[in-house]
Image (cartoon, grey):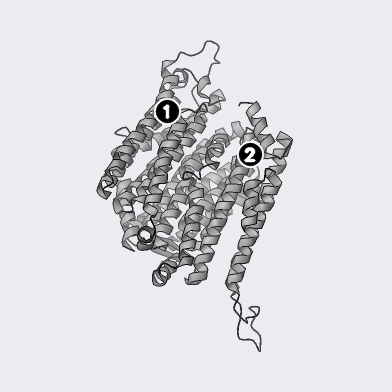
């Protein structure tokens, strides 16, 4: 979780930031799923011979969160493409420099 | 029909969004968007009427009983916020048509209205839902649509602004998810009211404390509380004018509502304010926001950026009210939430009019604008008076309640500081007055007409409303007081 967060903060490359964001989010997803684990439990499908099941609710929540994460990544990457078209770079410091040169 | 209103208010814009996409033709998509926002406004109005009679409305999505099913739960607080969001959303629709046409072009304009309706729907969903995870989902619907809307600005910096907001907004949302996850791990429920009962049973365990910290930080990012405001100035500056107005008036306000909801409803009062010194933390941050952001606002050349910084300062006032943790303080916060939504919305719309005619909002290029566009400028200046808190404007009412609440809490130096920071607002509004009325029109200035009626009317409607609610305060203060009592009383 912290590794992803660190990448988001420390890297100048816009794509790397998004990758970091993904690692950060994936870590949170795993955290949720670990809550759902019941010791000795099996997949939450009713079947003979099993009595302990994992809690399916965190799984369902995380399915939703994954969809949100995918949408965010897609939108982020689309923005990076547009930024690249306009500025010709995806490095944060170079974009900053280009903005400073040309006052609006 | 009436019983289904809580669902309808969210579902109408949600259905409207793909409909906008399907009809494609620009005036049709505008019509669809307008009808949807207006329909939601009517729903919100009826819901508020029901809520003022003192009943809490509980709507079970799909007939699944809470706490397992998703519950929409409406008391006075969210009915009030719903009204603000739908009201602003409806008023600016007539404005949107011309303004967006000139700033965005006519090609693919239906994308704009689709994103706008999704953003609107997300805000309403966040406000109305009684389920913590559902709140996150709506928050992301709203945020994703907002990033798209900001990126639609003319200037290429809109793209970087949107990107910056995307990164920070996602971090904020993920923090909220972590907080909700920890709460779920400790209590095994996601329904807010169920949560509040179970948290009271569990007491202040370490997990609850961690969840609380993550939630407060995540929500503060969304509401742009100093020092987590970095995304806001660029986003408001480079977004299309109408979107700046919409975001300034609603998005941060809904985040404030979420903060209120978590502080007072989900976590109980003892945990929030007795076990943790949150009142001092919030008050300090709010004070720094008021002074730092107002000072920065004074030095801005771009007027939209100036208003953006002033928004951060005004959010400081709202949070300060909440930090008093008293009924009077929360009332002041909510009144200011309503008033600031109108004032700032109106001012951004007035800037949009100037942008439409002059093509820039840089203060150096607007010498003598008061003579060239008298009505627009008058609206802008009146809004500015509201920000200062001149008597007879809505801003005065909120500051009055804020100072009273500060005195009641016994933090009397704060009352003095509130007045002092208002003086900073005087400076930046004065710069406006000076440029608009004192300086002569440059000789080579191009001739500009007054903005067209479709832009002027919504602007004046909001500014007029801010004056009206400065004189007639029954609706705002009355509802805010009852809502504050409900929020605090349920737990007290």
Query: Circle 2 sits on which residue?
Result: B160
Query: Circle 1 sits on which residue?
Result: B428
The CA distance from mark 1 to mark 2 is 27 Å
Which residue is at the front of the view, B327 or B171? B171
Which of disc 2 and disc 1 is earlier in sequence? 2
Q: How many marks?
A: 2
Which of the numbered marks, if any, corresponds to residue B311? Answer: none
Please indicate whether residue B68 sits to the left or right of residue B343 in the image: right
- Compared with B100, B171 (above or below) is below
- Compared with B250, B98 (above or below) is above
Q: Chain of mark 1?
A: B
Q: Residue A47: where, in percent of width, then height?
A: 66, 85
Please indicate whether residue B213 sits to the left or right of residue B76 in the image: right
Q: Residue B6: where, in percent of width, then height?
A: 46, 59
Q: Say if labels 1 and 2 share a chain.
A: yes
Task: Tell me, yes or no, if residue B115 can be seen here.
Answer: no
Task: Tell me, yes or no, if residue B388 can be seen here.
Answer: yes
């Amino acid at each position: 979780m912290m590794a992803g967060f660190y990448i988001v903060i420390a890297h100048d490359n816009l794509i790397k930031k998004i990758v970091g964001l993904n690692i950060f989010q994936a870590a949170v997803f795993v955290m949720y799923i670990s809550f759902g684990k019941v010791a000795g439990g099996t997949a939450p499908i009713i079947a003979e011979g099993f009595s302990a099941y994992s809690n399916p609710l965190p799984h369902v929540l995380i399915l939703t969160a994954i969809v949100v994460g995918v949408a965010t990544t897609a939108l982020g990457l689309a923005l990076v493409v547009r930024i690249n078209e306009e500025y010709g770079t995806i490095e944060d410091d170079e974009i900053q420099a280009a903005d400073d040169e040309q006052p609006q | 029909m009436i019983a289904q209103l809580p669902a309808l208010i969210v579902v109408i814009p949600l259905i409207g969004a793909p409909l906008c996409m399907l009809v494609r033709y620009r005036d049709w998509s505008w019509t669809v968007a307008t009808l949807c926002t207006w329909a939601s406004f009517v729903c919100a109005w009826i819901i508020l009427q029901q809520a003022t009679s003192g009943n809490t409305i509980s709507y079970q999505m799909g007939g699944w009983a809470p706490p397992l099913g998703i519950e929409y739960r409406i008391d006075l607080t969210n009915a009030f916020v719903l009204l603000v969001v739908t009201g602003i959303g409806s008023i600016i629709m007539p404005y949107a048509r011309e303004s967006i046409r000139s700033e965005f072009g006519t090609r693919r304009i239906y994308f704009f209205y689709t994103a706008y309706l999704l953003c609107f729907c997300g805000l309403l969903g966040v406000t109305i839902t009684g389920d913590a995870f559902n709140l996150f989902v709506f928050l992301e619907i709203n945020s994703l649509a907002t990033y798209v809307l900001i990126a639609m600005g003319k200037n290429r910096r809109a793209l970087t602004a949107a990107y910056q907001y995307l990164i920070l907004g996602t971090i904020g949302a993920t923090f909220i998810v972590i907080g909700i996850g920890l709460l779920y791990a400790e209590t095994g429920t996601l329904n807010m009211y169920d949560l509040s009962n179970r948290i009271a049973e569990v007491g202040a365990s370490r997990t609850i404390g961690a969840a609380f910290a993550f939630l407060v930080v995540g929500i503060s990012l969304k509401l742009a509380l100093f020092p987590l405001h970095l995304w806001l100035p660029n986003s408001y500056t480079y977004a299309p004018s109408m979107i700046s107005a919409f975001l300034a008036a609603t998005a941060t306000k809904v985040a404030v509502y979420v903060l209120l909801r978590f502080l007072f409803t989900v976590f109980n009062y003892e945990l929030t304010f007795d076990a943790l010194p949150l009142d001092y933390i919030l008050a300090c941050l709010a004070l720094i926001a008021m002074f730092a952001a107002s000072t920065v606002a004074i030095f801005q050349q771009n007027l939209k950026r100036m208003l953006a910084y002033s928004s951060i300062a005004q959010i400081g006032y709202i949070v300060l009210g909440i930090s008093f943790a008293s009924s009077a303080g929360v009332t002041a916060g909510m009144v200011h939430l309503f008033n600031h939504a109108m004032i700032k919305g109106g001012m951004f719309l007035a800037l949009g009019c100037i942008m439409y005619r002059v093509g820039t909002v840089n203060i150096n290029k607007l010498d003598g604008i008061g003579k060239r566009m008298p009505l627009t400028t008058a609206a802008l200046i009146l809004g500015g008076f509201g920000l200062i808190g001149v008597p007879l404007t809505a801003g005065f009412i909120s500051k009055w309640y804020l100072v009273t609440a500060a005195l009641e809490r016994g933090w009397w130096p704060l009352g003095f500081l509130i007045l002092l920071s208002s003086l900073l607002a005087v400076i930046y509004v004065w710069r406006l007055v000076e440029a608009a009325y004192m300086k002569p029109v440059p000789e080579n200035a191009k001739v500009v007409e007054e903005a067209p009626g479709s832009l002027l009317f919504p602007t004046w409607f909001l500014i007029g409303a801010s004056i009206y609610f400065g004189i007639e305060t029954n609706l705002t203060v009355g509802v805010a007081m009852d809502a504050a009592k409900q929020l605090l009383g349920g737990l007290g």
